[in-house]
Image: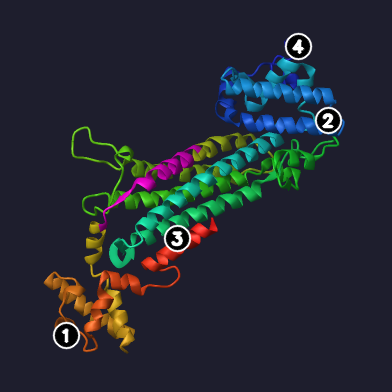
Amino acid sequence: MSSSSNPAGKLWGGRFAESTSALVEKFSESVSFDARLYRQDIRGSQAHARMLAKVGVLSEADARAIVDGLDAILADIEAGRFEWSEQLEDVHMNIEARLTERIGDAGKRLHTGRSRNDQVATDMRLYVRDVIDGLVPLIDRIADALLDLAEREADTVMPGFTHLQIAQPVTFGHHMLAWREQMLRDKSRLLDCRRRLNLLPLGAAALAGTVYPIDRHFVAEQLGFDGVTENSLDTVSDRDYAIEFCAAASLILVHLSRWSEELILWATPMFGFVDLPDRFCTGSSIMPQKKNPDVPELVRGKTGRVIGNLNALLVLMKGQPLAYNRDNQEDKPPLFDSVDTVTICLQVYAEMIPHIVVRRDNCRCAAARGFSTATDLADYLVKKGLPFRDAHHAVGSAVGYAAQKNRDLAELSLDELRRFSPLIEADVYARITLEGSLAARNHYGATSPEQVRAAIARARSAR
């Protein structure tokens, strides 16, 4: 169509009598952010062209020209030779227009039997799938690094906390395995998201399907989808997979934020449990002694934006009727930002964890404060026949006495301990030392060094 018969100057401009306002073009373009979908858009278009040739809608010559032309465009984009145009609105129109410039009328036939509605849905599913396939190995790296750290610190005593108060002794290795469990759930959620999204949208067209004899299952096989979507109306309007991904990303960042909070506390002189590598910290412009845990702090801060992106997508979708609405253009900035943020946060943790230095003496000294073996003394009395509530009361009284003396329970003499229960014998000291407390918790999933090593062995054999 000549420019004189298409004043709008758009690939869709035949119905319009005037050009789009420059302000509206700037307001409505998406190529400034959706250009990152170019790989997925080209893969989807090539599979579509092959399918059209298979069913006889395109000639084999046109299909070959389209596939080869798109390969050349991909090479141009990757080499930085491709000029993106806001006037062409989005990644799809930019690539299609350039393809037509390259190969002529065959490029105009590419869009037969599809709409930008199912095209973008296909691109987005391919993109999220590619992202997940990149994040899973990164999570595996972190999980492996945590296993190694847990093994190094399987015997390291540290205080376990509830309410951020010293509760019971645990091993540092056990704590690292707790972090690892969170990562494993994150991986599982991403893989669940991938399984649900891995259905081909292409073929839904604008909203009702197409009159052409398309073969959707052929395209699905070409693109590595497990099957095809069932309902064309739902297909073009569905963004559940983007919301699910952002929900999974939010939980990943929540977990990393909790780790960050612990590392920030542990790295302070008041705790002194760990040293973070210098290359993951910064100094102060005025205080020369400072070593600030910037990486954990930034991860903790970036968590808020990823949670905000999830909320943005939920609010975006909550009022939309079926089927496609232009609102859905706004699904990409929060999704892309979540992808970028969760990726860099996982990368820095994968680099940092192997180099964390644990200050074992400080961890042990902290566990020795706060009467962390009080429950062990209560359990000792219960095994001697005292009802638990009576044992709880007796030990509480012993803790109050020890606090007045500024001593730990294990530092009290046998005569002092027997003031609170005549059932206490000399064997009590094997139970109320830190090592005795840990060793006593020797069952599946518990914190004893033996169980920590058993858990590590199970994890390694399951990989």
Residue designated by label 1? 419
Relative height, residue 430 to residue 296 (above, below):
below
Question: Is 310 left or right of 207, judged from the image as shown?
Answer: left
Q: Which residue is mark 3?
A: 456
Picture quadrant where residue 202 is located: top right
Nearest to viewer (mark 3 / mark 4) = 3
Q: SS at mark 2? A: helix
The region drawn magenta spans 340-360
Please name the predominant secondary structure of the magenta segment in the image: helix
- Residue 445 image point, x, y percent: 44, 68
Q: Secondary structure at mark 4?
A: loop
Label number found at residue 443:
none
**Relative to 214, residue 107 above or below:** above
Give the side of residue 212 with respect to residue 320, left or right: right
Residue to which mark 2 is pinned = 53
* Amino acid of disc 2: Ala
**Which residue is outermost to the top?**
4
Q: The residue under label 1 is which amino acid type?
A: Arg
- Cα distance, mark 1 to mark 4? 102 Å
Position in image of residue 198 (x %, y %): 67, 46
The magenta stretch spans residue 357: yes
Whole-number angstrom distance, CA of label 3 to CA of label 2: 54 Å
Q: Give the CA separation, mark 3 to mark 1.
A: 43 Å
Alpha carbon separation for disc pair 2 and 1: 92 Å
Mark 1 crowd level (few <14, some 14–19, many ≥20, 10 Å Cα): few
